[in-house]
Image (cartoon, rainbow, N blue to C red):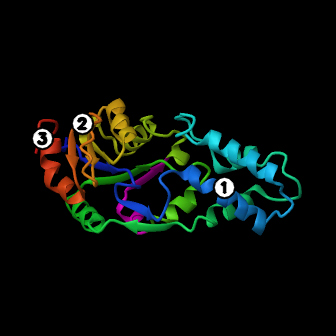
Amino acid sequence: MGEERRAVVFDLGGTLMEYRNMPNVWVDFYASAFEHVRCTLLPALSDDDLAAALQKLRSYNPSVNYREVDYTPEKIFTDVTAGWPGDFQVQDVIRVFFSSMQLEPYIYPETLAVLQKLKADGYVLAALTDVATGMPDELHRSYCKELLPFFDLYVSSVSCGWRKPNPKGLEMIAERFSLSPQAMLYVGDEKKDILCAKRFGCRSVLVDRKGSGADFGQDFTVKDLNGLYVDLGHAFAGVLPL
């Protein structure tokens, strides 16, 4: 039998890329996004309609009400818009809501070069990312389209139905490529990424771009992806043969 392949799994936001000029939390977008829906699509909506919708969407946000299970945008916005007057399609509300945010993706300078090196070295590369509450997965993918060709598998909270730190996404990746947890490394920038790796049983790397010194129990800490590439040998040493 041949040696088991190794896989490096990446979170996306804050790890490989970010959105420029966005607030610290998604809920800060909600009021202006709903106002955009009213102005663009449904002028009959009252202030009370918008306030109720905002509170409902806020209740779905995991930073407000912790949850690991994820829901489709259609389910979330059907609930959010329940009782709204007029004739409308939920898909149109979703489209207009997120178009108002004018998100501008920014891929970190070293990201593409490091992914190219890892690909050339024969690693299985995968993405495991949480999608913003109510955002369609296809929209989320459009913001990282330059990264997608490098991944052998892309898994999101929408596609697997679970948000981190639930390990379901890592389990799906392991099953797809017949990998043991020891053959996998998860790279992220948040506590939930490290907890996800721990619950799954693989090693973890925290990308600490701001030098916060945070300790979530990660196995390794790097300041950027260049550091990750240098430390990969150490990450798998003692777990798999070099």
For label 3, the residue is 237
Closest to the observer, 118 or 143 = 143
> Dot 1: few (<14), some (14–19), or many (≥20) neighbours within 10 Å?
some
Numbered tag placed on residue 222 in the rendering: none
Label 3's element?
Answer: loop
Residue 117 versus residue 24 in the image, above or below: below
Q: Residue at x 36, y 30 (%)?
A: 199
Residue 134, position in %: x, y?
62, 50
Q: Earlier in the sequence, mark 3 or mark 1?
A: 1
For label 1, the residue is 31
Q: Quadrant of residue 76?
A: top right
State if disc 1 and disc 3 touch (CB < 8 Å): no
User: Label 3 to label 1, Cα distance in Å?
Assistant: 49 Å
User: Label 2 to label 3, Cα distance in Å?
Assistant: 10 Å
Q: Earlier in the sequence, mark 2 or mark 3?
A: 2
How many tags in the picture? 3
Closest to the observer, 230 or 29 = 29
Q: Residue at x 18, y 55 (%)?
A: 227
Q: Quadrant of residue 31?
A: bottom right
Q: Quadrant of residue 178?
A: top left
Horizontal side, residue 111 vs residue 153: left or right: left
For label 2, the residue is 182
Q: Which residues are magenta?
A: 146-156
Amino acid type assigned to the residue bearing label 1 in the image: Ala
Q: Residue at x 56, y 68 (%)?
A: 102
Residue 95, position in %: x, y?
67, 63
